Structures are given as C-alpha cells and as structure tokens.
Amino acid sequence: MIGGFGMSSLFPNVVELGWSGDNGWGTSILQTLYMTFWPAIFAGLLGLFFGVALVVTEPGGILENKVWFNICDKIVSIFRAIPFIILLAFIAPFTQLLVGTQIGTTAALVPLTVGAFGFYARQIQVALESVDHGKIEAAQAIGATNWDIIHDVYLREGRSEIIRVSTVTLISLVGLTAMAGAIGAGGLGNTAISYGYDRFNNDVTLVATLLVLLFVLIIQIVGDLLAKKFNHQDR
C-alpha cells in the first residue's frame, strides 16, 4: 500500500497486463533485451570491421587504398542516412528472405542491425582516429605488421574511446527497439504504444517509458565505469 492506495489503484492497467503471457511486462522486457543484445553483437562486428577499414584505408592510413576507402565510406554513409522507420520498410523483402517473416522480434533483428551498424562504424572511425599517430609511427619503426598495429595500437590504445562510443550506440539501439516495437515488433515500445497510448492507458505508457529509461541508465553507468577503468590502465 502507498498512502492508502495499492498498485491496482494507482496503476490499474499496469497490473492488468500482468508479468507473464504474450503481453505481460516480463515478456516485453525480455523482447527488448533480445532486440538489443543480438543487433548489438551483429552491428558491433560489422561496425568494427567497417570502422577499422575506414581508418586504415583512408589517405595516410597504414593500408591506404582510395577505392576501398570510398566503397566503405559510401556504404556506411548510406545506411547511416536512412531514417530507421523508412529502413524498416526498405529492407522488408530482405528481412523476409533472411528470417522468413517481416513481423515480430526476430524479424526486427535485421533492420536493427542494419540501422545500428552504420552509426557504430562512423563512431569507431572517430574513436580510432583519436589514437596518437606517434605510437603508430613508432610501431612501424620497430617492424610491427599491419595486424599488430591494428590490434596492439589502434584497438588497444583506443579501447577506452571505443567503450564510450559503444555505450552511445547501445543507448541508440534501445531507442530503435522502442521504435520497432511501435510497429508491432514487440517489446516495451509495443507495450507503450499498443497498450498505453492507443488505449489512453497513461499508466502503462509511463511505466514502459520508465523501464526504457532504466535500461539506458544502466548502460550509461556501466559504460562510463568501463571507459574510466581502461582509460586509467592506458596511462
């Protein structure tokens, strides 16, 4: 009881949804986590690959190659520029081909991955370009291979900044899952819109929003702690 009122009095529609079942809060939370985790892995790998490729093939890079740089740059720019809601519709045929459906949480993994990777790749590019070029030149002077420079200089020296941009990307991805949920992909976004806003159940919209904010807060705190930890180790 809170001030003489129970949960069922303060948040009647929240209680009515319950925890389990197809529309329960537990299900929505798990769907949001599912739509955040896997795209983070897939987009992370793609973004890291393209981000590294952009840095090493750019003019003055250790593997300078104008053709490959322009190809990677255009791919990243195109997918970064397309608004997510349009991207959902644009790659729907590819999603259908890949997972056999265009709706649901699993189908949402495809546009979420594509939508996040371009943003992350550009963030990785910026993070790696902040690495001291003097350390790169020193590694080249002692005969380090290109792979050694990528792994031991770029990725190691830039890991604190990589964690920071990864945190920003994860937070952005949580927002994208809410947008995907709003068009039927499930998760807290779907709960907030379908069972909150559309039915004028403001308590449901409020709780769903607070849960999304909680996810964002946890990601931010963990990301900041890890970034500070590795930043101190690098000094």
Image: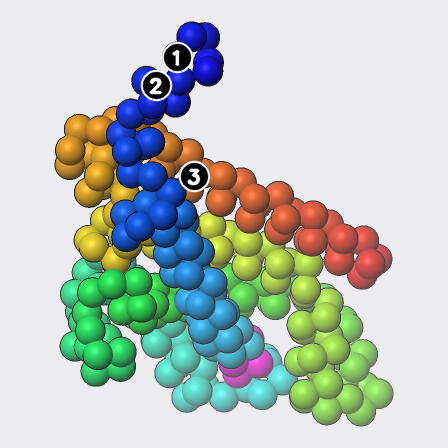
Which amino acid type is marked by label 1? Phe
Q: Secondary structure at mark 2?
A: helix
Q: Earlier in the sequence, mark 3 or mark 1?
A: 1
Instruction: Choose top left, top right, bottom left or bottom right for residue 36.
Output: bottom left
Q: Earlier in the sequence, mark 1 or mark 2?
A: 1
Other residues around mark 2 within 10 Å, as few (<14) / some (14–19) / many (≥20): few
Whether residue 162 sits left or right of residue 44 in the image: it is right
Q: Which residue is mark 3?
A: 211
Instruction: Choose top left, top right, bottom left or bottom right for residue 109.
Output: bottom left
Other residues around mark 1 within 10 Å, as few (<14) / some (14–19) / many (≥20): few
**Residue that appears at 17% across and 28% down:** 200
Q: Which residue is mark 1?
A: 5
Q: Which range of residues does the magenta coloring cover?
A: 53-58
- The label nearer to you, 2 versus 3, is 2
Which amino acid type is marked by label 3? Leu
Q: Secondary structure at mark 3?
A: helix
Q: Which residue is mark 2?
A: 10
The stretch drawn in magenta includes residue 73: no
Q: Position of residue 161 (x, y in %)?
A: 64, 58
Asked if the residue at tag 2 contacts the one at tag 1, i.e. Cβ–Cβ closer than 8 Å, the answer is yes
